[in-house]
Amino acid sequence: MPQSKKTKILIVEDDTFLAGIYANKFEKEGFEVSLATDGEAGLKAAGKEKPDIVLLDILLPKLDGFEVLEKLKADTGLRAIPVILLTNLGQKEDVDKGLKLGAADYLIKAHFMPSETVDKVKKVLSAT
């Protein structure tokens, strides 16, 4: 019997402690997890690994999350990958900008437990 393919998630988060918490949670849920700690590395990893979904912080070194999102959506090979912004920026302008740039969802870290973030990711994946 063929082994079922694990869903690949790329987490782009510069807080390594937080990234580890999310990675652990997603791995327990059966995801294959890749991590990147800055925007440039996240963009490279997305191009190389072609994840099923990207969890993207906005405040990142090198390239911010908005720039990464724009570049992902401009790339024909990557634009279909859903991106969920996971950030502490909760201003309406930031939320609107992220969604306008093509994010599938916008989660404010302080409002979501990692388990709720996993549920959101599953929901977005089931809609694609």
Image (cartoon, rainbow, N blue to C red):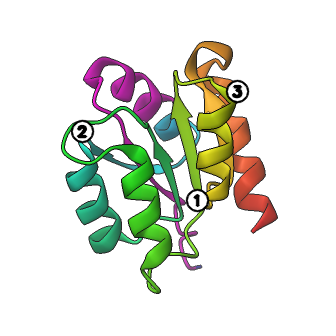
Residue at 73% over, 54% down: 124
Q: Position of residue 30 (x, y in %)?
A: 55, 46
Mark 2 element type: loop
Q: Nearer the viewer, mark 3 or mark 2?
A: 2
The first of marks 3 and 1 along the sequence is 1
The first of marks 3 and 2 along the sequence is 2
Q: Which residues are magenta?
A: 2-25
Q: Are marks 2 and 1 in contact (CB under 8 Å)?
A: no
Q: Amino acid at mark 2?
A: Thr
- The answer to whether any part of residue 11 appears in the image is no
| Residue receiving disc 3 | 116
Q: Which mark is residue 37?
A: 2
Q: Nearer the viewer, mark 3 or mark 1?
A: 1
Q: Nearer the viewer, mark 2 or mark 1?
A: 1
Q: Nearer the viewer, residue 33 or 18?
A: 18
Q: Position of residue 118 (x, y in %)?
A: 64, 36
Mark 3 element type: helix
Q: Amino acid at mark 3?
A: Glu
Q: CA distance from mark 3 to mark 1?
A: 23 Å
Rendered position, 106 above or below 48: above
Q: Position of residue 128 (x, y in %)?
A: 74, 69
Residue at 59% over, 36% down: 94
- Quadrant of the image occupied by residue 115: top right
| Residue receiving disc 1 | 101
